[in-house]
Image (cartoon, grey):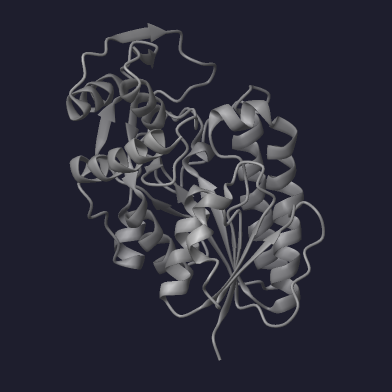
Amino acid sequence: MKEVAVVTGGAGFLGSHLCDKLLENGMKVICMDNLLTGNIENIEHLFGNENFQFIKHDVTNFIHVPGRVDYILHFASPASPIDYLQLPIQTLKVGSLGTHKALGLAKEKKARFLLASTSEVYGDPEIHPQKESYWGNVNPIGPRGVYDEAKRFAEALTMAYHRYHGVQTRIVRIFNTYGPRMRLNDGRALPAFFSQALKGEDITVFGDGSQTRSFTYVSDLIDGIFRLLMSNETEPVNIGNPQEITILDFAKEIIELINTNCKIVFQDLPVDDPKVRQPDISRAKELLSWMPKVDRKIGLKLTLNYFQEKIKNS
């Protein structure tokens, strides 16, 4: 009998790739999404698959799934600044109430639960690169706090269910990820740069562009998440690419890739924007035998092809 996985936020960028991965590994997948920031187009290719089911549902409400469930992967949440600044209450609710409901389902079904957490739990870090043992530097009342604290609370609740109820739990801390199915209006640096460059607009860099990010191609991330799901590790694990780059250099890479004459313009840095972001992936290497494989140049070309198709068909 096939194992059954529930993916909350399964119509989102990462959730939809995760649905693909679980199906490829012989599971039945129940994708749950209220389509607030998810997109049905991300999962349309799966609708003919007898092992795939889509349920439109807001996971901040009680979750009922009849029959057997072996895995619950909680990916429901706005995840880009443009989303969680516009949807602050929904972001806090899905991180708290949504996580509570998903963990309740895991407890009821005796299922393994994996939480999609984030590098944002480290805030604007004073430790570099960021290890899982670092507690973070987060402003709880700043505009970004709605996302950062929602994920920090979700981690605390997940560990409480593990310790108090004995639920099998896993926590992945996801660093900046890119690839097909990202939204052009996502608001994060990569889709924003691509969107502006492809439309012939000036590229907007916040601050002086010296802040750094580390970009992981989506197939690498999904591979790491699957390995964590199948492992026995209950403590948080960073999954990301430690190859760090300044935002200014990254903007220049995009301009060169697209071969455009776009200029770079500078705007004020948003409040509490992290100055550095680089994962320490020692634990992922040791515990999961995982390392990123896709070179950024290759990943960016694949992502560019996707965005060009989206713009052409829009």
The quarter holding residue 169 reads bottom right
Foreground residue, 194 or 41? 41
Foreground: 41 or 183? 41
Between 121 and 305, which is closer to the camera in this rendering? 305
Where is 253 relative to 56, above or below? Answer: above
Q: Is residue 103 visible?
A: yes
State the residue at coordinates (19%, 30%).
257
Between 201 and 287, which is closer to the camera in this rendering? 201
Q: Is residue 85 above or below residue 149?
A: above
The residue that appears at 35% across and 66% down in the rendered structure is 287
Q: Height in image: 8 above or below 241?
A: below
Residue farthest along the front direction in this orientation: 313
- Does 308 sit left or right of 110 as displayed? left
Query: Residue 266 appears at what percent x and percent y?
Result: 37, 8
Q: Residue at x 81, y 55 (%)?
A: 61
Q: Position of residue 265 (x, y in %)?
A: 34, 8
| Residue 231 visible at all | no
Name the quadrant of the N terminus.
Answer: bottom right
Q: State the residue at coordinates (68%, 82%).
A: 68
Instruction: Give the mark count.
Output: 0
Q: Residue furthest bottom?
A: 1
Q: Position of residue 151 (x, y in %)?
A: 61, 44
Residue 248 in the image, given as x and y percentages of width and height: 28, 19
Looking at the rendering, which quadrant does residue 83 occupy?
Answer: top right
- Asked whether, in this view, residue 295 is left or right of residue 88, the answer is left
